[in-house]
Image (spheres, rainbow, N blue to C red):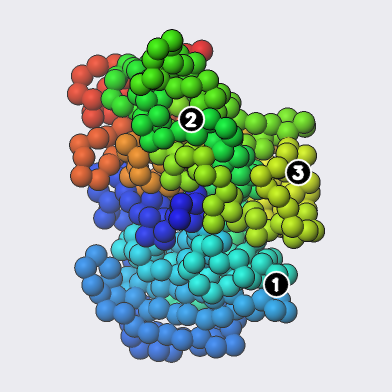
């Protein structure tokens, strides 16, 4: 089965959101941190359900192991409304830094896994996680979608409830109010992050939203792409995709001053795939007209009559990664059903629907549904979050073959225009060569949590981020959108040899 951009394994989500290099010392405490060593196994056993507003709660004391400190694990079911069953787990470290870290899920599931909380725990954060309102980790399990309470939980209520109850528990457990509360998520977790900023601006002081699947345009993009490559003669083999990628890199890789296999600003890459059309008598290392048309349409995207995207564009330079989330081989719709949109047909249209015939008008109808109203986190009005001093850090991999960075950039621009405070309290970063939440040839390790914490504590927005790649010497400066890193010569991994500037038109 082809993996979906909504179905990244939780281990990968944990890696992408927590793998870190910001100040070359990932084990250093965040700024303004003070440790509270007031917890032990006795305190853990003394936790009561009332501390978090649950009818029942289970606790266990987990001894220190490896990089993880000793911590108290508290699990419970929260029922803020009739029919709501929100599973939560809180992990309370022995030496607490006075802060809370909420974590998002992936696919159509929440995330209770310890691996996702490991970075926060190792730094002294009390962590909070939820199953999103329905149990299980299978990202394709939509058996709960017929339950209105479960829909509301997953759409927005679970994270908010997790946050409110978690704060109550943490404050009672340590006997002192928490100083800061942050939220971090990628993909579906990125949507959850934006939903918190929009609907519940008081929950968190700082929010990290990565590659957010914040609109059904992401799912419709998967459907349109599958239909695009399924047209007669439009399919692309792995060799075809490599041919296109190599040509795009040849044309645009060095525009940032360095030929390194990464396009720093793919949105400005104007390479035309028509240059690959087979000439008379040529049958190798070239493409047929229908294949070139599918490439060009993938790069351009497709819009509805009102100008909104129904298929987000895909970036030049990351073509060899497209097949992970898209049926580039022409096989059409697979069991993933366009990110779950097939299973949602009764909620979006009121009946079964033939997605092979989907049009822009159909996407507009789906986005007017009650489900979309609850699920989509596309409101650019962040005045409630910004007015309380909240900081929003957005990021996206430029080679993401699932949710496109174009969608995140669109949201950033809309929020920037809608909120006077955005210039001081919101930043967006695009990571060259990075795929969905992690992976790809680009530097995909960034200490986002440290960057956010420093921003919240001292009020200075990050001028850039430092990105590295595990088991490789690659090290790059990541500039805040719309600035792009430009190389000036010298050691390529020395950040002093890179500057942030406007991309040439």
Residue under the point 33% across and 36% down: 442
Residue shown at 77%/32% (left/top)?
306
Query: Is 47 on the left-hand or right-hand side of 214?
Result: left
Q: Secondary structure at mark 2?
A: loop
Can you identify the residue that label 3 sits on?
362
Say which label, 1 or 3, has the lower sequence index. 1
Separation of residues labelled 3 and 2 (CA atoms): 25 Å
Image coordinates of residue 233 in percent, x first then y, are 53, 30
Q: Are marks 2 and 1 in contact (CB under 8 Å)?
A: no
- In depth, the one of 289 and 144 nearer the eye is 289
Residue 372 in the figure: left or right of residue 130: right
Which residue is outermost to the top? 280
| Residue position for label 1 | 147
Q: Secondary structure at mark 3?
A: helix
What is the distance, in whole Å, between disc 2 and disc 1 at their CAs?
Answer: 37 Å
**Which x, y percent locates residue 362?**
76, 43
Query: Which residue is under mark 2?
Result: 315
At x 78% / y 58%, what residue is drawn?
Answer: 351
Which label lies toward us, 3 or 2?
3
């Amino acid at each position: 089965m082809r993996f979906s951009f909504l179905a990244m394994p939780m281990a990968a989500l944990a890696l992408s959101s927590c793998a870190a290099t910001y100040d070359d010392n990932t084990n250093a405490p965040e700024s303004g941190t003070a440790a509270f060593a007031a917890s032990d196994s006795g305190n853990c056993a003394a936790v009561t359900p009332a501390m978090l507003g649950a009818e029942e709660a289970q606790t266990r004391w987990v001894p220190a192991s490896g990089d993880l400190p000793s911590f108290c694990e508290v699990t419970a079911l929260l029922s803020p409304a009739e029919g709501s069953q929100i599973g939560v787990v809180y992990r309370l470290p022995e030496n607490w830094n006075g802060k809370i870290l909420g974590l998002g899920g992936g696919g159509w599931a929440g995330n209770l896994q310890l691996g996702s909380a490991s970075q926060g725990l190792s730094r002294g954060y009390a962590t909070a996680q939820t199953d999103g309102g329905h149990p299980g980790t299978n990202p394709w399990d939509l058996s709960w979608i017929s339950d209105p309470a479960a829909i509301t939980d997953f759409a927005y209520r679970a994270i908010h409830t997790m946050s409110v109850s978690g704060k109550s528990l943490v404050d009672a457990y340590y006997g002192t109010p928490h100083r800061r509360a942050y939220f971090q998520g990628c993909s579906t977790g990125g949507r959850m992050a934006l939903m918190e900023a929009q609907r519940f601006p008081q929950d968190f002081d700082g929010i990290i939203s990565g590659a957010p699947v914040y609109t059904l345009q992401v799912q419709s993009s998967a459907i349109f792409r599958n239909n695009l490559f399924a047209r007669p003669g439009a399919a692309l083999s792995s060799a075809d995709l490599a041919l296109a990628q190599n040509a795009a890199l040849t044309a645009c890789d060095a525009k940032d001053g360095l030929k390194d296999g990464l396009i720093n600003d793919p949105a400005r890459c104007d390479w035309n795939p028509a240059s690959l059309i087979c000439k008379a008598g040529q049958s190798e290392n070239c493409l047929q007209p229908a294949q070139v048309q599918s490439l060009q349409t993938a790069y351009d995207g497709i819009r509805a009559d009102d100008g909104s995207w129904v298929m987000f564009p895909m970036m030049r330079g990351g073509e060899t990664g497209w097949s992970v989330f898209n049926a580039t081989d022409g096989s059409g719709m697979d069991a993933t059903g366009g990110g779950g949109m097939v299973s949602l047909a009764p909620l979006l249209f009121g009946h079964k629907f033939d997605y092979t015939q989907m049009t822009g008008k159909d996407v507009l109808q789906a986005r007017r549904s009650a489900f979309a109203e609850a699920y989509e986190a596309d409101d650019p009005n962040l005045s409630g979050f910004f007015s309380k001093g909240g900081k929003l850090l957005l990021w996206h991999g430029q080679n993401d073959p699932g949710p496109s960075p174009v969608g995140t950039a669109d949201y950033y621009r809309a929020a920037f225009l809608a909120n006077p405070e955005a210039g001081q309290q919101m930043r967006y970063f695009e990571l060259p060569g990075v795929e969905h939440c992690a992976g790809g040839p680009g530097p995909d390790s960034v200490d986002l949590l440290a960057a956010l914490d420093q921003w919240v504590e001292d009020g200075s927005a990050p001028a850039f981020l430092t990105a590295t790649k595990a088991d490789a010497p690659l090290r790059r400066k990541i500039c805040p959108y719309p600035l792009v890193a430009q190389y000036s010569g010298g050691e390529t991994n020395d950040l002093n040899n890179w500057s942030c500037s406007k991309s040439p038109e």
